[in-house]
Image: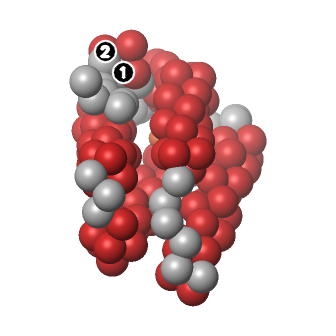
Amino acid sequence: MAFIFWTDAYSSKVEEVDNQHKFLIQIIDDLYLAFQKGEQKIIQSDLLFRLINYVHYHFAYEEGLMMQYKYHELDKHKIEHQRLTVKVLDYYKDVKIKDKDISLELLNFLKDWLSDHILKTDKEMGAWLSEQPQFVTNKMP
Ligand SMILES: [Fe+2]
Ligand SMILES: [Fe+2]
């Protein structure tokens, strides 16, 4: 049984956003698998780094779309992104500098944060975007 997996309930009505969410979910699930196998070195050298890079890319993508279409909830949405970015970067520093192992607590936090954020904040964004008459592209603005 996967730790976290994609279901249609996560669908935001914006295909590219959904594809990126699927990828994020996969990274978190890979992190959990590696954690279960005790592969802390792989987590430290590769998976956490991959997560941070992809989170950064994904948030920039969503924020670009919201800016392009002048979404009224942009600021609120950005604050949620920033809070997670700070938390993940702090954790990454702990792992890199203090050589801490990844914990189940962090994995649960990531899982809960991502599903809550997608189910509420991203879905609201996607519903709004998909209703804009000029919204025609899923490409990077
Ligand atoms: Fe978001
Ligand atoms: Fe998102």
Q: Are marks 2 and 1 in contact (CB under 8 Å)?
A: yes
Reading the image, the residue beneath label 2 is 8
Query: Relative to 50, is 70 above or below?
Result: above
Q: Is mark 2 within 8 Å of ligand 2?
A: no
Q: Residue type at mark 2?
A: Asp
Helix, strand or loop at mark 2: helix
Image location of residue 117, percent across then percent down: 57, 33
Q: Please say whether residue 91 is visible from this viewpoint.
A: yes
Q: Is residue 139 left or right of residue 109?
A: left
Image location of residue 37, percent across then percent down: 27, 52
Reading the image, the residue beneath label 1 is 11
Q: Residue at x 53, y 53 (%)?
A: 103
Binning the other alpha carbons within 10 Å of mark 1 as few (below 14), some (14 to 19) or many (20 upward) gives many
Query: Relative to 64, is 47 above or below?
Result: below
Image location of residue 44, percent across then percent down: 39, 73
Q: Residue at x 57, y 86 (%)?
A: 97
Helix, strand or loop at mark 1: loop
